[in-house]
Image (spheres, rainbow, N blue to C red):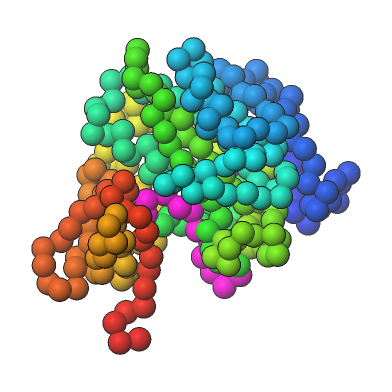
Amino acid sequence: MADNGGAERAQGAGPWTDLDRAPLDGRAITRALVNGPRASWAEVTVVPRTGSTNADLVAVAATAADRTAVIADVQDAGRGRHSRSFTAPPRSQVTVSALVRLPGIPPDAVGWMPLLTGITVVDTLRSVCEVDAVLKWPNDVLLTGDRAPGKVAGILVEVAGSTPALTVVAGVGINVTPTAEELPVPTATSLRAAGAAVLDRGTIVRAFLRAFGTAVDEWRDSGWDTAGLAQLYRARCDTLGRRVRVTMPGDEVLVGTAADVDGHGRIVIAPEDGCAPVAVSAGDVTHLRAVPDAGE
């Protein structure tokens, strides 16, 4: 069962209403994740404002302990893949970055970290917030259904060091309470707009960090096996089976069916021209969009 931490439900009464957007309770989060009986993190810092939680952790990666996290009430210079920026009203998002060390991980498995992070976000939103969350390859998190579908979360994973063990920083931004008018683009959504059962940011970030730590532990204990991870990813990936348009650097375009995600985390496209399937990595893709079937 997901830990709700005694947080009020979205519809419940309390000292703060949803639109008041209460600041995070740093002491409660630290007590739950660092000091409590279910502690699994070495250090968790909640800051009122920062430019980028990812940048903050990358800057201290050489000396920070494994399992260090930074959570911001307000993030002014958030960024995603391809350095795309994003903003949101103060205290309306979960913005968290987590530093983990991955001793012994094969170099060709590191590319699975963004996908593992996406799996964890999807599972957290499904279990805690009771929304229909899915993955759009490689690691955008979407909400489906008739009520406020769209992108609800983004992920950016960066390699922050290689000695004594490979170190990555995984950053996650989840739209929690932005209204339709506050969302940056029409294709975005929020947990509030989708009628999520839980909108308490402290509850969501605690659940995510616990699940993320457990997922990394389980992957490590498997010997960094990617076959099981690939099965988990495929089960959550809404891109598979869809007709897609893939734009690559130099405006090269590939249209076909997203047929699979291979053992390296690449999307496998079956081109419409009948040529052999093509596997493309996230770094080779500028945009990937689902498009209507030919003739529609």
Query: In the figure, is residue 259 to the left or right of 200?
Result: left
* Quarter of the picture holding the N terminus: top right
Q: Nearer the viewer, residue 206 or 180?
A: 180
Picture coordinates of residue 259, whole percent (x, y):
24, 62
At a point 78% along the width and 56% down the height, the residue shown is 11
Q: Is residue 196 above or below residue 281?
A: below
What is the x, y in percent for residue 137?
Answer: 37, 54
Rendering quarter of residue 238: bottom left
Residue lying furthest bottom in this view? 295
Q: Quadrant of the C terminus?
A: bottom left
Instruction: Please tell me whether the stretch drawn in magenta is mainly helix, strand or loop.
Output: loop
Q: Nearer the viewer, residue 8 or 268?
A: 268
Question: Which portion, as a residue range, is magenta?
Answer: 137-147
Q: How many marks?
A: 0
Q: Is residue 274 visible?
A: yes
- What's the residue at 41%, 33% (across, down)? 158
98 in relation to 293, above or below? above
Direction right: furthest residue? 15
Q: Position of residue 107 (x, y in %)?
A: 25, 29
* Residue for point 29% across, 82% down: 294
Query: Does the stretch in magenta take in 156?
Result: no
Examine the rendered structure and indicate whether residue 283 appears above or below residue 57. below
Q: Residue at x 29, y 41 (%)?
A: 228
Query: Would residue 124 be visible to someone looking at this image?
Result: no
Find the residue positioned furthest to the front.
250
Instruction: Where is residue 268? Give x, y as percent.
Output: 22, 57
Is 198 left or right of 139, judged from the image as shown? right
